[in-house]
Amino acid sequence: MPIPRYELDDRNFQDLVQEMIARIPAHTPEWTNPQEGDPGHTIIDLFAWLADTLLYRVNLIPERQRLEFLRLLNIPMQPAIAATGLVVLEPVKGKYNHSVNVPLHTAIKGPVSFETSEEITVFPITGKVYIKRRPTEAEKKIFAEIQLHLEGIYDIDQSEPYVTTPMFQEAVNDPDGIDVSRETIDQSLWIAILAPDAASVETAKNSFHSNEYGEKIINIGFAPRLSVPNFDEDISEPVNNKEIWQWEMPSARTDKDGISFEIPYLNLKVVSDSTKCFTGQGIVKLALPSPDRIALPDNSVDINIFAGTGNLPPRIDNEEEAGRLVTWIRLSPKQLSETLPVRWLGVNAVSIDQRKTIQNVVVAAASGAADLQVQLPGSSVDPDSFELQVEEIGTGYQRWYNRQLLSADRNDRFYELDAEAGIIKFGDGVRGKIPEANSRIRIQTMRYGGGKSGNISQRNLSSISFPHLKLVQPLETSGGVEAETLSNAEKRIPRVLKHCHRAVTRDDYASIAMDTPGVELARVEVLPRFKPQQRMEDLPGIISVMVLPKKSEFMPPNPKPDRNILSRVYAYLEERRPIGVELYVIGTEYISLGLSVAVSIRDGFPRQQVMQDVQNSLREFLWSLTPGGHQQTGWQLGRSVIDHELEVVIARVKGILTVNDINMFKLNELKKWEMLQGNVRSLNLESWQLPELLTVVVTDGDNAQTALYDEYGSGDETGDDSRKKIPIPVVPEICRC
């Protein structure tokens, strides 16, 4: 966007004349009838004209100075950030009997333009995820007798009943996903690889054959269920799930004679993992073994009585679907894992971003003049993928590079890219080479776009510009941020001049953290010499940066950063901290608070409305962001909550006659409300803590309630070790009419 013109003084010639005439009675009262043509009026006109000319130049010089200053400092406005997401590609039935390669930057149609951000091999299969789910209490009663009979048939002492349950399907999609470790009996996710129909099972399996380009790669899309990390959790490095979880396929190798509830599995090689060990959304690329090494365990009890038991894949009782089975892929733990929260998982997935790509486009012809500027056919350009070529006599097109011209030599093929505006600037012959006159300037590759318009909900992207492929969008796209506005740039640029992208002082850390791309923060606090793991203060060489995301409503839960926000802020600060500083990026530690208030209400005021206003005023006052706290910038870290201060807040509510009583509560270790005692009741906080007001009870009377009955938080269920029991499928009787 262009920088608009500002006027420091918007008075014009006529305004100045009228202002001076209005001053005549005060300064020269003997001049009673000023008229045009009078000598005095002519002098007024002359000075008004001089002042108008000066004001015109005053309004121009600051703009010129600012633009020239920013040009010399190379501080352009920040471009838009593109939204990203995952989609699943499926072949149209009967169109492909082999794998096809979809190239990079293939266009995707929808309300906003997207493109694939990687190449993908699409197999003529679909994937459906299943889990071995524990029965509910009601189901256990129904299945109890069936379980006893099955133990007798299988000749086993102990069994663990399960229900084969599809996951991440449109009809039964759970927005919260599933914790694989805690909500399944075998801590595993099972992906059924399905052919389009029963007749094409072998064809689909043969598509796994390697070719002259090497082994075939299958894409597994993964989206975690993001959670709020513990206050003392170190997020500087991703959780190393790589050593805990593994991908497997049933092996054609047989270790035992006959049939059994135990079969061998092949370990699949992970070629790449953009999920960073299941801590973020991305793609896991697996190398497929040759078809002759892959097995398909019998799914029918008519063939194998042990179908679905032990470590065998879950039994599918839908005969049509079972007939399309090609094989299984299992995500299982090498060792017992505490947690693996998964929101979605799917096969033939590819990552996408909200950008357009143009290639081999001539955008201008050089004039031979110094400081040439060329407008590109798009704004918010991705500088990492941008490649520019300039034609040179005798050698053809040569690649030029995006570098700062201030550090360039006269023969360097350098240019400067203003990514936000989509403008490139060439050198002047002293700093950077001047393109030869009439030489053509060509874009070899340019990707551009972005903004909040790319943050769209699931199932809004419709198709892909590749023949005979269907597109499914199982998740919303996210991460799109608008290009920086002028007002935000004017606030950011002084901070940049102050810290120069180097975190040294306390304010530097706060400013740089607030400027983290793609993250919207509402509050940043810097805790020097504080280590969150041990909750110890006054330790030299340590900086803890506390960040809180934006939240508009003043209701619990209070704003808490998830792992994605903490990781991005940490990565941005890590590159800018001094060597020797131990950096931590954390959320805040909230201390739960409950209030019980007794008030008297003035006559004529609606009782329910006044009581609701009391609740709202307390929530706003104790809020961790603006307008909370005494300074309306959020409750101060470590400041105790005192009952007398709360009484003042309540008394200011319109319609309150008197504040009769107030009780304060905090949650104890058993997650029960415990009333605070003392003449002056207060919730004492440490320097890294904030209050979290969970419940407010307001009554019209003399005495406040002395007990609260709401319970918050939940304990983790710890069952026995399911691996000591043999999983067996239990299903209600199926009608085969």
Image: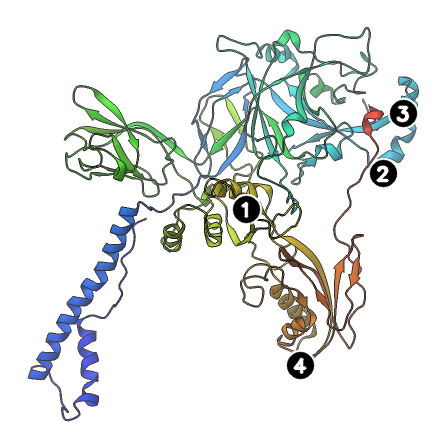
Residue 158 disc label: 3
Q: Amino acid at mark 1?
A: Gly
Q: Where is 588 relative to 216, above or below?
A: below
Disc 4 on helix, strand or loop? loop
Q: CA distance from mark 2 to mark 4?
A: 53 Å
Q: CA distance from mark 2 to mark 1?
A: 54 Å
Q: Can you identify the residue that label 1 sits on?
A: 541
Q: Position of residue 532 (x, y in %)?
A: 63, 48
Q: Position of residue 154 (x, y in %)?
A: 89, 18
- Give yes or no for contact between labels 2 and 1 (Cβ–Cβ under 8 Å): no
Q: Position of residue 30 (x, y in %)?
A: 14, 93
Q: Position of residue 733 (x, y in %)?
A: 84, 26
Residue 604 disc label: 4
- Please indicate whether residue 68 sits to the left or right of residue 132 in the image: left
How many residues crowd around disc 1 within 10 Å: few (fewer than 14), some, or many (20 or more)? some
Q: Where is 281 relative to 49, above or below?
A: above
Disc 1 on helix, strand or loop? loop
- Please indicate whether residue 25 sits to the left or right of residue 685 in the image: left
Q: Amino acid at mark 4?
A: Gly
The answer, for residue 163, to whether it is visible in the render is yes
Q: Can you identify the residue that label 2 sits on?
A: 137
- Give yes or no for contact between labels 4 and 3 (Cβ–Cβ under 8 Å): no
Q: CA distance from mark 2 to mark 3?
A: 18 Å
Q: Amino acid at mark 2?
A: Glu
